[in-house]
Amino acid sequence: MEDNEINLNNPIVQLEVTKERLRHVEEKNSQQEGSLKNAYITTGRLEAQLKQTVDDFHDMRVTLEVTKQKLTHAEQALNQSSQNTTGKDRQTKWRALFASILFAIASVLAGVGGNQIASTPPNSFGEFLIGLGIAVYFVAAILTTLLT
């Protein structure tokens, strides 16, 4: 045999090959341990994010329920207010109708009173009708002021 040839059956060569394989396996194992450590760190971070997300979700559910309750109360208050307003609207409409009728009566009284004064012979009852028309007009004006 030559010195340059490697004898694989030689125990020293086998020992060196085994040492090299062991070193390679140890390097690979070290790399895998590093990867595993990074995976644990990433997993811990993701678990923390998941816990925070779950907590946020529960907070949002509570906020949603509180908002639903506020909305329900607001709807009830609006319905109650609407019912009260409807009653006031009816009353206002009746007052407005009554005021319009009073304005019409005041106009008729003033017109008839004016005709009575302008007739021949002039009738003094016309002055009374004009005065009554003015009084009715003031009552109607006050009534329209109170509509609001």
Image (tube, rainbow, N blue to C red):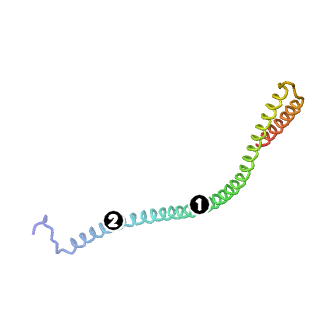
Question: Compared to 7, does 140 lie above or below?
Answer: above
Using a 10 Å C-alpha cutoff, classify the residue at mark 2 as few (fewer than 14 neighbours), some (14 to 19) or many (20 or more).
few
Viewer-side residue, 57 vs 87: 87
Q: Which mark is residue 27?
A: 2
| Residue 136, position as x, y percentages in the image | 83, 37
Using a 10 Å C-alpha cutoff, classify the residue at mark 1 as few (fewer than 14 neighbours), some (14 to 19) or many (20 or more).
few
Question: Compared to 54, does 120 lie above or below?
Answer: above
| Residue 118, position as x, y percentages in the image | 83, 24
Q: Dividing the image into 4 quarters, which one contains the C terminus? A: top right
Give me the residue at 78% from left, 35% from top: 108
Q: Is residue 48 left or right of residue 79?
A: left
Give me the residue at 21% from left, 75% from top: 11
- Residue lying farthest to the front in this orientation: 121
SS class, disc 1: helix
- In the picture, residue 125 is in which quadrant? top right
- In the picture, residue 60 is in which quadrant? bottom right
Q: Amino acid at mark 1?
A: Leu
Q: Amino acid at mark 2?
A: Glu
